[in-house]
Amino acid sequence: MRSTYRFLSILAAAALFFACEPLDSDDSGNSGGGNNTKDKTEIHMIDGKALYELSAGKDTVAIRFTVILDEKDADWSIESSADWCEAEPASGTGLGVVNIIVSENSTASAREAEITIHGGKNSEVLKVEQCLYAGALPDESWFSKPYYERTDREKAGLRGPVKSWYVSTYTTYDKYYYDEAGHLVKEEYYNTTDNYMEVRWVHSYDAQGRRVKSEQSYGSDAEGGRTFTYEYGNTGKLVATNAYHWIEFQEGWVSGKNFPLSIWKDLSAIHYLDNSPFYYEREDIVFAFQPDGNLVITDTYCRNQDGSAPDVSVYHIAYENGLPVSCAESEVAVKYDDKGNPAELSVDGGAKTWTFLSHPRLLLPATMSEPKAQGMVAMFWGNYSYDSNGDDIRFERAYFAADQVYNDYYGKYFYDSHGNWIQRNETTEPAFQHGEHFTSTVNREIEYY
């Protein structure tokens, strides 16, 4: 009985103690009407942000803070709401210098996590948002297709049923349109400063999805224009369309630095006509395979409407394993990887050389060298760097002199639900203003079916 009585007395005393606590006391033990500072812990953020927006790749961001108790260092700890987002170190005293380490987002959606800093009875919450990873969507079965068998939309590295796209940041830009099958059907040029739009190209296709005509006008008020028509008789053959290079050099906004293969399946002839009121030009290119498997290109060019005095050129393209590898007349040579994608290209007998990365989505240049470069527009060399999605992150090159180096940086890509980038940050160092950098945010507008 004595023990029970003593236990009840303790409970009563405890109840009396808590009943006497001021009603306006805060979580730190500091009452509104007194000077009690016991266990008053404060967290001061030095360079922390409420929200960190990170790219899809593996990333690390640093935060700094201090935790004090009565003007003295206090212990702190950090916890994360997600296992893909970790803090190192996870605990400490006083000044905190912590790395938030985020693993690569290989999921099909963006994700969020919360980093919580605990200090005494207080806490500070930081949010981390990581955007969509563009290279691991489950519907990307076309990655396994050889590059020259892909649709125009696939060659551009676009995912999903893209109907059109353009980069809206600049005052002049091109807009590209695709049909539902992925064929490029129209290209428009816009000048927003002069409020001017020109339909540059309209492309049409046959029932087999092969391009049969391309038409270009000189402008909205001009008559005539340029027309290409295409014939197909080399069934099952991969045809190099140009004797000087069969990799079409296209550095644009398709997806960074992009070099589409200019190899057309089944092609046997191209007919070109420029028939404006003030200008006439005609060119007929015939592609004929020989019994040895090599290709002969006969190019007939004429400036006279009556067809007189044509200029005829003949080129011989050597083939290996069904792919064009060299042309003696133009001194072009191409090496391929085991997937049939170009590994190295040299033109003019090695005056310019490109090497390429083996990538499932795009044909990406890794390096470029031009040892005989001369003049203001010549590039001595260039190195290209990409993230795991194949999107540009750096372009390093030398103009004017081989050791005069300039850099462009591309970072913080943001993607839509299909995995196509819709915004990226750029830092550019123009060759004509060495040492000056220009940073901008570039937006890409995409419309889907």
Image (spheres, rainbow, N blue to C red):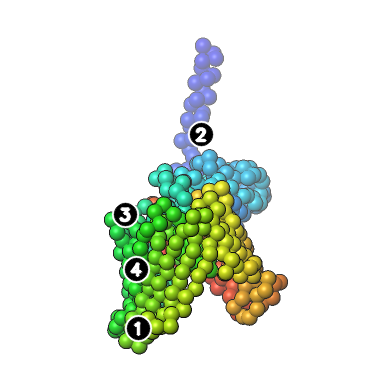
Question: Camera-side residue: 274 or 431?
Answer: 274
CB atoms of marks 2 and 3 within 8 Å: no
The C terminus - image quarter: bottom left
Residue 17 image position (x, y, % from top left)? 51, 34
- For marks 2 and 4, give the one nearer the viewer: 4
Question: Camera-side residue: 348 or 184?
Answer: 348
The residue tagged with tag 2: helix, strand or loop?
helix
Q: Is residue 11 left or right of residue 165?
A: right
What residue is pinned by disc 4? 229
- For marks 1 and 4, give the one nearer the viewer: 1
Look at label 4 and name its amino acid.
Thr
Q: Can you name the residue that lies furthest to the top here? A: 1
Spatial CA distance of label 1 from label 3 is 35 Å
Mark 2 vs mark 4: which is more N-terminal?
2
What residue is pinned by disc 2? 17
Estimate how packed mark 4 is, as few (under 14), some (14 to 19) or many (20 or more) residues with alpha carbons within 10 Å.
Answer: some
Look at label 3 and name its amino acid.
Gln
Spatial CA distance of label 2 from label 3 is 88 Å
Spatial CA distance of label 1 from label 4 is 20 Å
Residue 370 figure quarter: bottom right
Residue 114 is labelled as none
Estimate how packed mark 3 is, as few (under 14), some (14 to 19) or many (20 or more) residues with alpha carbons within 10 Å.
Answer: few
Look at label 2 and name its amino acid.
Phe
